[in-house]
Image: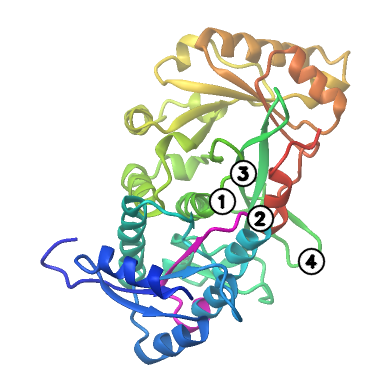
Amino acid sequence: MTDLLPKPKVLLVDDDPRILAGLRRQLHQRFLVATAGSGVEALTLVAAEDDFAVVVSDMRMPGMDGAAFLARVRVESPRSTRVLLTGQTELSAAVRAINDGQVFRFLSKPCPPEVLEKCLQEAVARHRVTLDEPRLSPGSVGDRRLMELNDRGEVVVAHQTDKGNRQFRLQYQPIVSLDDNGAVGVEAILRWIDPQPGRSTSMAAGGARGLHMPLGRWMTAAACQEVASWPATGSDPLGVHIKLFPGHLGDPDLIDDLAQTLILSGLEPHRVTLEVPQTLALGASLPFAPLDTISRWGVQLALGIDECPPMPSSTVQRLPFSAVKMGVRQAAHEPDNTEAHRTFGAGTELARQLGASIIADGVECAKCQVTARTAACRFAQGSYYGSPADPGDLLPGLVTGRR
């Protein structure tokens, strides 16, 4: 924290007074610390002051638990950044906190002092962004409800009951390791919600092509923020895979926006994979310098293979692609489709030349999975492992592999 700025106000909520006293001693030099012994007492403080930069709550408290309390804080003080500190390991608690409380971070007790302080500093930085950018703050910090575009083309958040023909919803599809079918990451998918009930499609095919830049910015920030808040589902934290679209890839602020996103979310760069579609990689306007800079931070780059055979490896060797992603469905189900098999084989060979892992996309059945494993694909994605879903529906299925 700098001396030029006032100490940010932090509210700590725990039913154990000894823990509150210890946290106050630990944090008082950097923060203005207020404490409360219950959710009810804390809500009284929030209503009276309403300027807490960060609210940190224990999960297990008598009466109102931490998830329920933070859900109330989200309503009463929406710009306060919310953190859940808990010794519980139940996934249901995390799901409730993510869905209802929109928590910024989920920390396990006992939490090392340096981890808590780093989290609070990042949470304060996020709070300041919401104050500086009130129009975009809900989407930019991970609010995952439906959103729409107003008459000026600005991205704003809308409730699920809103009517209109320009609404979007951020969902996630699991990516698994073919060694054990355990989840290693998710792909963030921005779905265009058709006003007709039950109809939706991905952003790429949903008539939103002129909006790729603002929506790409929002999706990247929201997905990184949200995945960073999820509890660990195994020995390694999940990564997030984000597909770049033409307008987003050409965004002159791509580097600055991504740097800010990584700082505010606290997501380690190596957990982020940006997919460059083959059609864009072939283009003369591909921004090699920004992508090279991003990769040097540790962000992973993946090459998405389209329906046509991939270009020679010399064309893409200028960028350090760590993965090649390609569809497997046609190769698995259409033995006489020579073009599909040629594309699949060329993609496999390209990955070998690049020293890149292969992600099999469109795995919808056991036969697709066998084809992927036979081709030495390391990872897979598709309806066989899970369809795009909201975190509350997705997280329980990520604890163990499905097949």
Left or right: 271 as drawn, with respect to 53: right
The residue lying toward the viewer, choosing from 100 and 301, is 100
Distance from label 2 to label 3 (Cα)?
9 Å
Q: Are marks 3 and 1 in contact (CB under 8 Å)?
A: yes
As drawn, 154 above or below 49: above
Residue type of the residue flagged with mark 4: Gln
- Residue found 41% across the figure and 75% down from its top: 17
Mark 1 and mark 2: Cα distance apart in space: 8 Å
Picture quadrant of residue 340: top right
Residue density around tag 1, few if under 14, some if 14–19, many if 20 or more, within 10 Å: many
Say whether marks 1 and 2 touch (CB < 8 Å): yes
Residue at 88 percent of width and 13 percent of height: 336
Secondary structure under badge 1? Answer: loop
Whichever of labels 1 and 2 marks the residue nearer the N terminus, that label is 2
Q: Earlier in the sequence, mark 4 or mark 2?
A: 2
Answer left or right for 144 relative to 4.
right
The span from disc 3 to disc 4 (Cα, nearest Å) is 36 Å
Which three-letter amino acid code belongs to the residue tagged 1?
Pro
Residue at point 69%, 33% (across, down): 182
Magenta segment? 74-91
Could you classify mark 2 by the number of other residues whose Cα lies within 10 Å: few (under 14), some (14-19), or many (20 or more)?
A: some
- Give the residue number, with chain letter if any, for mark 4: 196
State the residue position of label 1: 231
**Element under label 2?**
helix
Q: CA distance from mark 3 to mark 1?
A: 6 Å
The residue under label 2 is: 91
Q: CA distance from mark 4 to mark 1?
A: 35 Å
379 versus 338 height, above or below: below
